[in-house]
Amino acid sequence: MPILRDDRDLKEALQSCRTICVVGISPNPYRPSYFVSEALQKHGFKLYLVNPNCAGQTILGEKVLSSIHDIPEDIDIVDVFRRPSVVPALAEEAKKKGFRVFWMQPGTESPEAIKRLDREGYRVVAGRCAKIESNRLL
């Protein structure tokens, strides 16, 4: 059951998780990483924003960090807004930090990362928009 597809599983993951690490945040409000993060914030999730190119800036009232390892607390969801080619390495970084759900937004899915995370027993969401799912299920 590590690959979450059913509404029941997605809802449970969203309801039981409160801390989201958004990897690939953009300061541009027209980019999906920005407006999805804004919606998640409105649902009451605590966000940690990660983008080495924007580290130190403030986006959505949160200081942007340079890496997942800079997050000072446990992560429930890693929400990915990166090219599929870099997602396997990102998943390895996330495993070192620890997380409960690895969420690949539409267009970020890496078959290699999905297969590896699933095989290792991690919960994975692939190709689903966190904004749409949280608006629909919460």
Image: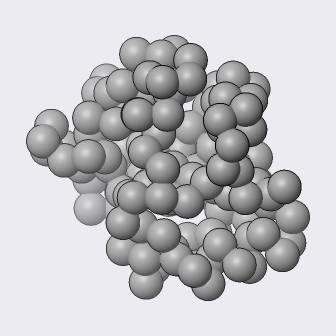
Marker count (numbered)? 0
Residue 93: image quadrant is: bottom right
Which residue is rendered at x = 74% and y = 79% of the image?
Answer: 116
Which residue is rendered at x = 34% and y = 36% of the image?
Answer: 36
Q: Is residue 17 above or below residue 23?
A: above
Residue 48 visible to the viewer: no
Q: Position of residue 38 (x, y in %)?
A: 32, 27
111 on left or right of 127:
right
Residue 123 visible to the viewer: yes
Which quadrant of the figure contains the N terminus? bottom right
115 on left or right of 131:
right
Of residues 100 and 47, the one drawn nearer to the viewer in this rendering: 100
Q: Position of residue 5 (x, y in %)?
A: 66, 50
Q: Position of residue 61 (x, y in %)?
A: 31, 24
Of residues 119 and 6, the one drawn nearer to the viewer in this rendering: 6
Which residue is rendered at x = 78% and y = 69% of the image?
Answer: 118
Of residues 135 and 24, the one drawn nearer to the viewer in this rendering: 135
25 on left or right of 121:
left
